[in-house]
Amino acid sequence: MSELASESSVRTEAATEQAVAPVAGGEAVLEYTADEMMSVAAARALRDGAVCFVGIGLPSTAANLARRLHAPNLVLIYESGTLDTRPEELPLSIGDGILADSALTVVSVPEVFNYWLQPGRIDVGFLSGAQLDSYGNINTTVIGDYDEPSVRLPGSGGAPEIAASCGEVMIVMRHRLRAFVEGVDFITSVGHGSGPDDRRRLGLTGAGPLRVITDLGVLEPDPRTRELTLTGLHPGVTVEQVRAETGWPLTLSSEPLVSTPPPTSRELEVLRSLHTVGQ
Amino acid sequence: MAEIKTLTDAVAELVHDGDSVALEGFTHLIPFAAGHEIIRQRKKNLTLIRMTPDLIYDRMIGAGCASKLVFSWGGNPGVGSLHRMRDALSHSWPVPLEIEEHSHAGMANRYVAGASGLPFGVLRGYAGTDLPAHTTTISTVTCPFTGEQLAAVAALNPDVSIVHAQRADRAGNVQLWGITGVQKEAVLAAKRSLVTVEEIVDSLDPVPGAVLLPSWVVDAVAVAPGGAKPSYAHGYYERDNAAYRAWDAVSRDRETFSAWLEELVAP
């Protein structure tokens, strides 16, 4: 469980858990894992020039990948106060020295939350979690009851305010039945609450999660109900597979499902060249 | 004025059983040496305050120093869980541990309020989350100008705050740089403060982005070279990521942890 504990404790090592059948990519036949597909899909979703608040683990991998591919002007901000950081290797924690060394500037922790995040100066918040529900609410606090949890997770960190105040939120998480649940055990970070208008009613200034990128496909909130619906599938994945790993009756988008193009050799090459500091 | 003391004397004089104690340092400059000294002096019944409890509080909790933890993210960054913290919460081992849980933004604003001499801090936060139902130091306040409802968090004013810095001068002025986290606020919010430093120098040459804590807001400065290891001191040594990974196995089991603890406190 611990490796799913929060955006700050998701493991970063190149995943090997699910080998995907080889897919023809141009001339060469490329082999890649479901985790690699997820990181590549998440990286592609970041537009160049966006200002991005990054959690450690999968979000950090994807953001650093994007910066080395199509988004060289992506501005990365970590909650330790490092603004516009350009690490050569992946940090293990949100406050590794490599983040400070390569930052445009380093600000205090009160400043990063009060001056940069809270007023809406960050376009994209990039989160993960242990549990996600059908409205994109995230749990990184406890599995089970708060006072007698079956699993105590690390807790909030910066996530609640990232989810509240970034222009939009992107979630990257492995798609597993135990994680994609009908209702989260604890709302650590609000997605779309319990439906339309909840964010406005709660005074949350950002648009909330507009995309959930998993190792199986892509989920997006229905424009009307705000419930997460399946909008895209990664190569070789079926709707049945996604439904089997989703704890609520997952509906399909009214638009045709988008097939994620498989990773290119360039994407895989850069992704595999990313190493965590000290590894 | 800060007095320059040994770490042993400074901890003995400033940290008392039952105190609320904040050891701050956001990944960087974590005051491990001071935390280990608190363990060696067998302090008890402390309320430990820290945004990211990290390995240092895992150790202090496992050693039985704490009866309460005030925090916002309790994990081993990039590695996994804090096993001693979890054992204390689930099985009261070695002693029961109460928690007071916040978000980072909430904790940061609690320190800011404490440093500012205000009873509470204001932020846009917590709305719609389950935390306010479990944490009495989170409430709401209505803006007197716009009528908007905002989150209010109680100020933090620790009995003692302890931070680690790169250096101090002989008068006890303290200079730290790199990721400076919430250390300035933690020291200014506290009733008493202790700063451990890598070295004491004749004069503090300016460093870009440095935080300067004047001698007259610090009670004691203690020289502790390497005092932030296995975290790091920017410009002195790097973070020992391997040690963070290795802690997972040491802390997972009470026996291996106890063996580690015995070695730490051995004379």
Image: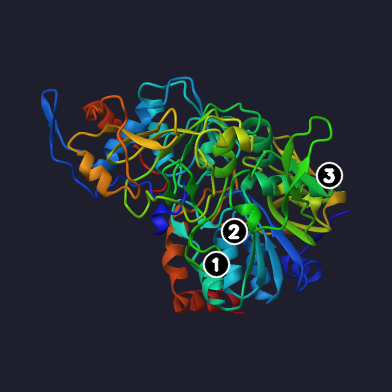
Whether labels 2 and 3 share one chain = yes
Assign a secondary structure to mark 2. Answer: loop
Percent coordinates x, y for residue A273 in the rendering: 31, 36
Asked whether the residues under the numbered discs 2 and 1 touch, taking CB atoms below 8 Å apart as contact, a structural biologist would say yes
Tell which subunit mark 2 falls on: B
Q: Is residue A6 visible?
A: yes
Assign a secondary structure to mark 1. Answer: helix
| Residue topped by disc 1 | B85
Label annotation for residue B116: 3
Identified at 51% across, 64% down, the residue is: A145
| Residue topped by disc 2 | B53
Q: Quadrant of residue A260?
A: top left
> Along the line of sight, which residue is nearer the eye, B72 or B1?
B72
Identified at 42% across, 58% down, the residue is: A2
Q: Identify the amino acid type marked 3.
A: Ser
Asked whether the residues under the numbered discs 2 and 3 touch, taking CB atoms below 8 Å apart as contact, a structural biologist would say no
Assign a secondary structure to mark 3. Answer: helix
